[in-house]
Image: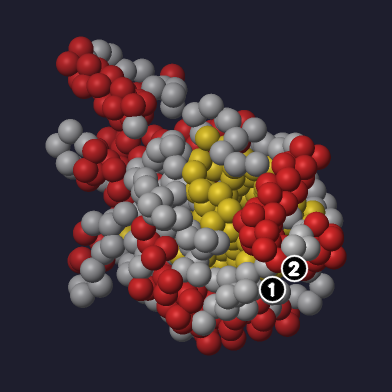
Amino acid sequence: MKKRRLVYVFLLLLLIVGGKTDFASLETNSYGKWQQQWKQIEPIPIQMAVSPGGEPGTLRFSWYSKNGESKTQFRIGEEKTGKQSRKQSVITKNATPGYQYHHVEVENLTIGKTYYYQYTIEGNWTELYEVYVATTEQYQVAFAGDPQIGASVELQPTNEQKQAVCADSYHWNETLEVIQKNTTNLAFVVTAGDQVHTRNQKETLQDLFAENEVEYAGFLYPSLMRNLPVATSIGNHDSQSKNYQYHFNNPNADTGYGETDAGGDYYFIYGDVMYLMLNSNCMESEEHDRFLAWACENNPKVTWRIVVMHHDLFGAGKHSIQEEMVQLRASFIPVLRKYHVDLVLAGHDHCYARAYLPMEAQNVEQDSVTTGNFLPRDTSIPTLISMKYGITISKQILKKLVNTSNQKRTLRQQVMKKQIQAFQKVCEDTVAYHSEEGILFLAANSSTGSKYYEPCQTLPIYTAVSVQQNRSNYTLLDVSKERIKINTYYVDTREKVDQTIVLKK
Ligand SMILES: [Fe+2]
């Protein structure tokens, strides 16, 4: 918060002092310069977005041009000169009034290689943009919670959307730069949804364009958006506008499952993982069930199933106790279990939270969901420890330690503390979960700081960890066939937000 206020003060000073601007040498780490550049981009929402393809070695591209522009072209190759590039067919359709969108799918790219692509704007080739195709055996994925460009509007000096977009996109760029600097084999960025803040009305076409295109322009403005594939999910702020599906060319998306105006469920494969991007704004769990059945049937050999959805079923913020979330929990949990999902990445609550739902915790019917109590009535210590800390302790060991019924309660608590301390000492800063025994849920904090929510005053019992320091976060997943290692960091200092999490099969 303090940092953002300083940025605004700096901006005001710049406005007062003024000065000459050399656009050729602009650096993105200056907010004043960022703002001057942004003024040129702001009215034209045409920026390129890169998305992962359906499988490694494929990429998908999407951008806008103004109506009436001559036939748009796209080419990609390994040469920095662009001369050896191969042309790709471009699908063009109407986007928001005044614009058309262009979608391209590129296949047969070589894993581990860097490619260069360009496209035409008003008949002229753009500069060449670099994009790396990560190797698949051990790779990284960056997970970013609600960028929600435009959401900081109430923090702005004059409460103007354009100021908020400028500031939020600056912080989005900062997060992407930190991710880029601290990864070596980054396959893609995945978001928890809410790319933008304004939920456009869908009554008229004009309304569709009216509000959120400037926010999409802000989301796509960082130059790294041309270089990094980004797999977006559909947040409640994205859900009511078709602009989402014009801007993002998602793979395996034409299924009709989980649809809202923005689009529906989609999936892609990378290495040993299937990423299942559910549109949780569609609350019909049967549709997601059918989508998961179809995706899993098509890809029976993947080791891991990671669901990405906007709503944090096991979050710790104010949304987690709302009626909508209560219903989502009750309807989604059986589906996630049915398809043996290992990990669920979500956002919505703008507050970091970790929870683990063991298979043995069966009490998830409507009543218990309402109270937030997922534990069976005769909650055992192993279940409690497993849910809160991801530690497995055999009942036999506990039985030996706890044998006097009168002292049971006290002793149990002592045992729990002792076991946890011992475990933490051995594992230092790491907590391990077995995906065969339950589902790990992570709720991301905001990746831009455009909005934060306080955790609930009384944390739900399922919450293992909840952190809110009003500082933006991002999470890095190191993915291999054997295990997924997860670290969450503050963007400003790169300090860890939570322990290192290791998810094993
Ligand atoms: Fe959000």
Residue at the location (75% across, 75% down)? 299
Other residues around mark 1 within 10 Å, as few (<14) / some (14–19) / many (≥20): few
Q: Is residue 407 above or below residue 131?
A: below
Q: Amino acid at mark 1?
A: Met
CB within 8 Å, label 1 to label 2:
yes
Residue at the location (43% across, 71% down)? 371
Q: Position of residue 202 (x, y in %)?
A: 25, 72
Mark pair 1, 2: CA separation: 6 Å
Instruction: Tell me if the residue at label 1 has its CB under 8 Å from ligand 1.
Output: no
Q: Is residue 47 visible?
A: no
Q: Nearer the viewer, residue 470 or 419?
A: 419
User: Which badge, 1 or 2, is on the more N-terminal residue?
Assistant: 1
Residue at the location (71% across, 38% down)? 429
User: Helix, strand, or loop for circle 1?
Assistant: loop
Q: Is residue 34 above or below residue 397?
A: above
User: Residue 359 bears which disc, if any?
Assistant: 1
